[in-house]
Image (cartoon, grey):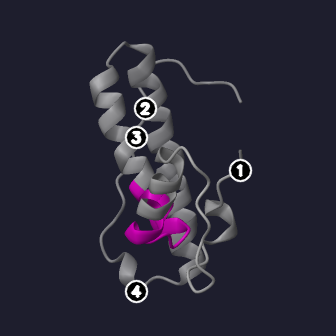
């Protein structure tokens, strides 16, 4: 994908998303995600790494919302990554397939 030159155009999400159909809301969130990633790339190119890191947190939060990932699931994934030993998941606590740690 070719990156656009110049300042990225910013698009603001309109209020009232709660009443929209799910498919339309997800499309808007995906469009917003693409815009945020473009802004992050622009900031990284301009050596503004602190702001790019802050924007990456917003991108993570939006991705979590899109994929319905809870904070506890994210924490469990981070704990598995941080530990040196492979952790066996309890049978009652299964992570979604997109959060499985692959080594």
**Over which residues does the magenta segment extend?**
61-74
Query: Could you tell me which residue is drawn at 66 percent across and 62 percent down?
Result: 98
Q: Quadrant of the C terminus?
A: top right
Q: Are marks 2 and 3 in contact (CB under 8 Å)?
A: yes
Q: Nearer the viewer, residue 47 or 97?
A: 97
Q: Secondary structure at mark 1?
A: loop
Q: Earlier in the sequence, mark 2 or mark 3?
A: 2
**Mark 2 and mark 3: Cα distance apart in space:** 7 Å
Q: Is residue 6 magenta?
A: no
Q: Earlier in the sequence, mark 1 or mark 3?
A: 3
Q: Earlier in the sequence, mark 3 or mark 4?
A: 4
Q: Earlier in the sequence, mark 1 or mark 4?
A: 4
Disc 1 target residue: 102
Q: Secondary structure at mark 2?
A: helix
Image coordinates of residue 75 in percent, x first then y, are 41, 61
Q: Is residue 85 left or right of residue 103?
A: left
Disc 2 target residue: 40
**Mark 1 and mark 4: Cα distance apart in space:** 38 Å
Disc 4 target residue: 19
Q: Say few, some or many: other residues with alpha carbon within 10 Å of mark 3 (under 14 / 14 to 19 / 20 or more).
A: some
Query: Could you tell me which residue is drawn at 28 percent across and 25 percent down?
Result: 50
Displayed quadrant of residue 9: top left
């Amino acid at each position: 994908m070719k990156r656009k030159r110049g300042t990225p155009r910013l698009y603001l999400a309109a209020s009232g998303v709660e009443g929209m159909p799910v498919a339309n809301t997800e499309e808007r969130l995906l469009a917003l995600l693409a815009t945020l990633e473009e802004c992050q790339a622009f900031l990284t190119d301009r050596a503004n790494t602190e702001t790019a890191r802050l924007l990456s947190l917003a991108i993570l939060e939006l991705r979590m919302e899109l994929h319905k990932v809870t904070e506890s699931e994210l924490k469990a994934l981070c704990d598995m990554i941080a530990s040196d030993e492979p952790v066996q998941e309890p049978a009652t606590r299964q992570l979604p397939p997109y959060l499985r740690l692959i080594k």
